Amino acid sequence: MRAEPDSLQLTVLKVGLDRPGSGLAHNPTESYCLRMPPTPTAVPNGVRIRELREGTGLSAAELARKLRRHVTTIQNAERGRPVSLILIGQLARALGVPPVELIAVEPAADRPDQTVR
C-alpha cells in the first residue's frame, strides 16, 4: 500500500538546545525538528522466515547484507520480535513469498499484547 503525500502528517516540535550536553551550539536557545509518524510494525512469523532463509541457502548474515540491514535485525525477525512492515516487505521480496506469509497469524504466546498495528 502506498501512502499519498498529503496523508503524511508531520509534527514540528520545538526542542530546547540550551540544555547542558546537547552538543548543538548553532542556536543556543532553540531549534526545530520534524517528527515522523511511527512506522507500522507487525509480529513476524519467525519460524517461517528462518525456514525460507535456510531453504535458499543463505545465512542470517548473508541475508542481512543482501537487504543492507544488520544481522541482529534478521535475527530479531526470526525470533518473532516486532519489526517494521518495510522489513517484512524486504524479506518477502528476498525470499520470494508474499509478505502476508511472513506475518504471524496470532501473537506469540509470551507477548500476548503484540499485534499488527
Image (spheres, rainbow, N blue to C red):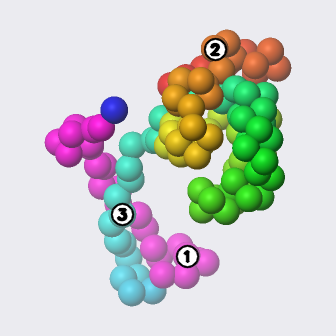
Residue drawn at point x = 33 percent, y = 66 percent: 32
| Above/below status of 103 relative to 82 | above
Relative to 70, 92 lies left or right? left
- Element type where label 1 sits in the image: loop
Label 2 SS: loop
Q: Is residue 23 above or below residue 69?
A: below
**Classed neighbour count for the residue bearing mark 2: other residues with Cα under 10 Å, few (<14), some (14–19), many (≥20):** few
Q: Quadrant of residue 92?
A: top right
Real-space Cα distance between discs 3 and 1? Answer: 14 Å
Q: Residue at x 75, y 19 (%)?
A: 108
Q: Is residue 81 visible?
A: no
Which residue is located at x 39 percent, y 43 percent?
Answer: 37
Write down the quadrant of residue 29 in the picture. bottom left
Disc 2 versus disc 1: nearer the observer: 2
The residue that mark 1 highlights is: 22
Which badge, 2 or 1, is on the more N-terminal residue?
A: 1
| Residue position for label 3 | 33
Residue 78 numbered mark, or none: none
The span shown in magenta is 2-24
Label 2 sits on residue: 105
Query: Where's residue 81, x and y in %?
Result: 72, 35
Which quadrant holds residue 54? top right
Q: Is residue 68 left or right of residue 64?
A: left
Tell me where residue 31 appears, x and y as whole percent: 35, 71
Give yes or no for residue 74 being in the magenta stretch: no
Q: CA distance from mark 2 to mark 1?
A: 43 Å
- Residue type marked 2: Val
